[in-house]
Amino acid sequence: MSPLLIVLMTISGLMLLLHFRGRNAVWGGTTMGIVVGVAISFIKYNRVLLAWSFSIGTLSGAFFEWLGRGSQQVKRRYLSH
């Protein structure tokens, strides 16, 4: 495994720990990443793709979770009277 992949997997694990409570986009992204990764790794016979898809799914889920939280704060701050 490449050092970049190890760093991404570590960050992804930390994201899962930070967003442990309840269902949110981080866990949804992780689930989709694992499902896609398992399917691709069985087709391509490459287990490293599973780690990549897990990391990408988790990080994209974290991005969308934070985007949603940020938009709620902007809505509360600027659109509420």
Image (cartoon, rainbow, N blue to C red):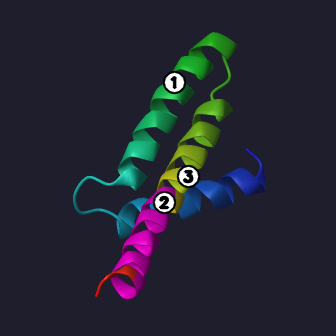
Assign the magenta stretch its main secondary structure. Answer: helix
Quadrant of the snapshot with the C terminus: bottom left
Write down the residue under mark 1: 38
Q: Amino acid at mark 1?
A: Val
The mark that comes first in sequence, 3 or 1, is 1
Q: Residues within 10 Å of mark 2 (few under 14, many from 20)?
A: many
Magenta range is 64-78
Verify CB contact (< 8 Å) between mark 3 and mark 1: no
- In front here: 22 or 54? 22
Q: Amino acid at mark 3?
A: Ser
Q: Secondary structure at mark 3?
A: helix
Q: Residues within 10 Å of mark 3 (few under 14, many from 20)?
A: some
The mark that comes first in sequence, 2 or 1, is 1
Quadrant of the snapshot with the N terminus: top right
- As displayed, is residue 57 above or below residue 17? above
Q: Residues within 10 Å of mark 1 (few under 14, many from 20)?
A: many
Write down the residue under mark 3: 60
- In front here: 58 or 42? 58
Relative to residue 37, is residue 2 drawn left or right? right
* Closer mark to the observer between disc 2 and disc 1: 2
Q: Secondary structure at mark 1?
A: helix
Is 71 one of the magenta-colored residues? Answer: yes
- As displayed, is residue 49 above or below residue 3? above
Q: Residue at x 58, y 54 (%)?
A: 9
Q: Distance between the Cα atoms at labels 3 and 2?
A: 5 Å
Relative to residue 36, is residue 25 drawn left or right? left
Verify CB contact (< 8 Å) between mark 3 and mark 2: yes
Q: Which mark is residue 62?
A: 2
Q: Amino acid at mark 2?
A: Ala
Relative to residue 68, is residue 46 drawn left or right? right
Residue 4 % position (x, y): 75, 56
